[in-house]
Image (tube, grey):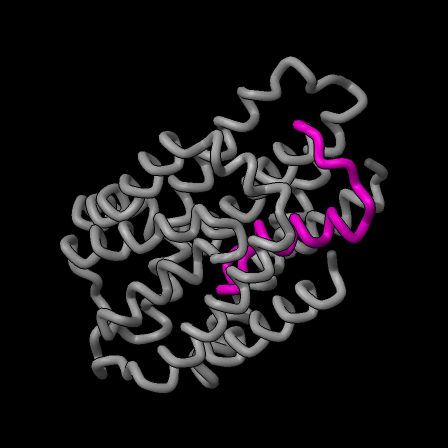
């Protein structure tokens, strides 16, 4: 993997991690079209550079994370537990799915259709911002669907909050918060799993990837909130459908 590949993958990760279009799916497709060999390091690299995106959320919302608010942390804990458990139990199956552009493509299309329909027919309750603990569990269960590459973790959590009729900006921000424990756990697990192959030749790739992911994710989050408040989520659905169909037609 060259540093040009690192920059491209970090750009894709940072810009797509918190958008409902699947960062994992985009990384799989990008790696495929760059002709990169799908080995243990590449698979781990795609997960570990998510740490940069995690830090972008923590830094941007540092007041929320440092504030002593037991209820806030309770929501994050209950919302994150289902996908952490499911991810641990299904980790071997998920690793096999990470090689399939077909799974990603169909997930993009199906998820895109659901997003468009949800945005058209499910209207938020005005002023409904504060997600309850019970609803955080429901959203966390829906998040488990995102273990399928191409579904999108942020997409699943946003859709979950949307079906419960929360305001769109609140749905997006809660998705950001749920990402912190979920992606941190995935990053630490992958880093530990490949600890024996990290050396002076590939460690710099990880460091550069994490830093660039942080920068690009910061920019993406700011733009995403502004876009969603004006236009909703349907355009992300249209994008998913078009990209998924293009991959199915031309990408194999």
The answer to whether residue 215 shows anywhere in this view is no
- Judge by depth and name the residue closer to the eye, 30 or 204: 30
Could you tell me if residue 118 is visible in this image? yes
Judged left or right of residue 192, residue 26 is right
Residue for point 62% across, 51% down = 13
Say which residue appears at 38% left-offset and 52% top-offset.
145
Instruction: Let me know if residue 39 is in the magenta part.
Output: yes
When the figure is inspected, residue 101 is found, relative to residue 249, above or below; the finding is: above
Quadrant hosting residue 216? bottom right
In the rendering, at what x and y percent does residue 179 appear? 42, 48
Name the residue located 63 percent from the left edge and 75 percent from the top edge.
Answer: 242
Tell whether 154 sits left or right of 26: left
Q: Horizontal and vertical percent for residue 82?
A: 28, 42
The region drawn magenta spans 17-40
- Apparent side of residue 77 relative to residue 225 in the rendered image (left or right): left
Q: Position of residue 35 (x, y in %)?
A: 82, 45
The one nearer the camera, 182 or 212, is 182
Within the image, what quadrant is residue 206 found in? top right
Image coordinates of residue 238 in percent, x first then y, are: 55, 78
64 relative to 195, above or below = below
Q: Check the image and name the residue furthest to the top.
A: 196
Which quarter shows the N terminus?
top right
Name which residue lies at 50% across and 58% down: 18
Magenta segment: does it hold 178?
no
């Amino acid at each position: 993997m060259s540093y040009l590949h690192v920059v491209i993958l970090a750009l894709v990760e940072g810009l797509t991690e918190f958008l409902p279009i699947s960062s994992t799916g985009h990384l799989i497709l990008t790696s495929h079209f760059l002709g990169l060999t799908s080995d243990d390091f590449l698979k781990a690299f795609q997960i570990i550079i998510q740490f940069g995106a995690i830090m972008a959320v923590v830094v941007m919302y540092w007041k929320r994370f440092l504030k002593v608010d037991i209820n806030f942390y309770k929501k994050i804990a209950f919302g994150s537990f289902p996908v952490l458990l499911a991810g641990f139990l299904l980790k071997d199956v998920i690793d096999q799915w990470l090689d399939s552009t077909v799974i990603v493509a169909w997930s993009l299309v199906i998820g895109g259709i659901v997003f468009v329909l949800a945005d058209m027919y499910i209207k938020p309750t005005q002023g409904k911002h504060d997600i309850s603990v019970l609803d955080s569990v429901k959203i966390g269960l829906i998040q488990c669907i995102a273990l399928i590459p191409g579904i999108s973790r942020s997409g699943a959590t946003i859709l979950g909050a949307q079906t419960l009729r929360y305001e769109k900006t609140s749905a997006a921000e809660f998705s950001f918060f749920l990402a912190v424990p979920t992606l941190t756990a995935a990053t630490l697990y992958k880093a530990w799993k490949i600890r024996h192959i990290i050396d002076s030749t590939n460690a710099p790739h990880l460091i550069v990837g994490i830093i660039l992911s942080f920068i690009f994710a910061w920019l993406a989050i700011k733009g995403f909130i502004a876009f969603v408040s004006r236009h909703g989520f349907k355009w992300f659905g249209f994008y998913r459908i078009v990209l998924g169909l293009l991959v199915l037609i031309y990408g194999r």
